[in-house]
Amino acid sequence: MREILGRRRRLLSRLIGLTGLTGFTGLTGFTGRKRDQSPGLIGAALTFATAWKWPVLPGVGLDRQDGTRCACPDPDCTVPGAHPLDPGLLAATTDARMVRWWWTNRPAAPIVLATGAGAPCAVSLPALAGARALAALDEAGIRLGPVVATPARLFLLVAPYSMEQLGELLYAKDWVPGSLRFHGEGGYLALPPSETGQGPVRWERAPLPGSAAPWVPDVEAVVDAVVDALTRTGVSAPEL
């Protein structure tokens, strides 16, 4: 057995010498790179971009001296670390090479999804109102897609929508919570497992495992259900 292992090691050494792949290991294949499915931010970013075709880019991240403040020039940044800066939002991509290069050079950068176009959008609520809404939706048997959570808010992912579609939807409502926010085309949100100045980003409702992009509902169905749920549960104005 030792002789066989020794022969394998010598063969691997010869292959490395012939190809110049100094990063080769028995677990990475002949690419000289770590597996795309490796845990952590780079693995998640590659899954979003390549398997699900969600355009992503690195967020600006947090200040190195103060882990709660944004690294951007704005001292009053309201989404510390969790927004694009350099590169800008238009650089969001599904290209594996670009994604790998970004997170190889900035391994702690938050993962930012560019919402809209062909990518999911989102509807978000403050954490308390969002938790009550989710409970009411579950009780009513409403099907939801993935839900992203931060300590401050819940983000319900929905299918892409246009501003015209959103305007007609809101116009038809007698009441919409003032803190119900919409993250549509030209917007963005941080995805798990990012760390931001507002705390960790996690899945409140994780996508089902598999290689295909997760199913997401239409925005009309989610807004109708959320507004109805909040009306029935009697969430007070301060909670919204």
Image: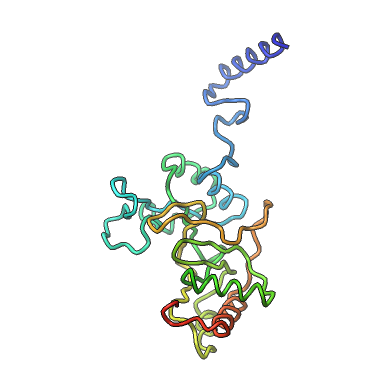
Picture quarter containing residue 239?
Answer: bottom left
Q: Name the one closer to the observer, 164 or 120.
A: 120
- In the image, what residue occupies the spot 66% across and 64% down? 215
Picture quarter containing residue 204?
Answer: bottom right
Q: Name the one closer to the observer, 174 or 164.
A: 174
The quarter of the picture where the N terminus appears is top right
- In the image, what residue occupies the spot 48% across and 68% down? 127
Which color scheme is applied?
A: rainbow
In the image, residue 124 sits, relative to residue 20, either above or below, namely below
* Residue 126 horizontal/vertical position (percent): 46, 71
* Residue 166 horizontal/vertical position (percent): 52, 79
* Residue 79 horizontal/vertical position (percent): 37, 61
Q: Relative to residue 82, is residue 73 drawn left or right?
A: left
In the image, residue 92 sits, relative to residue 37, either above or below, namely below
The quarter of the picture where the C terminus appears is bottom left
- In the image, what residue occupies the spot 51% across and 62% down? 149
Q: How many marks?
A: 0
* Residue 217 horizontal/vertical position (percent): 63, 70
Extreme residue toward the top, this view: 3
In the image, residue 220 sits, relative to residue 55, either above or below, namely below
- In the image, what residue occupies the spot 46% across and 63% down? 188
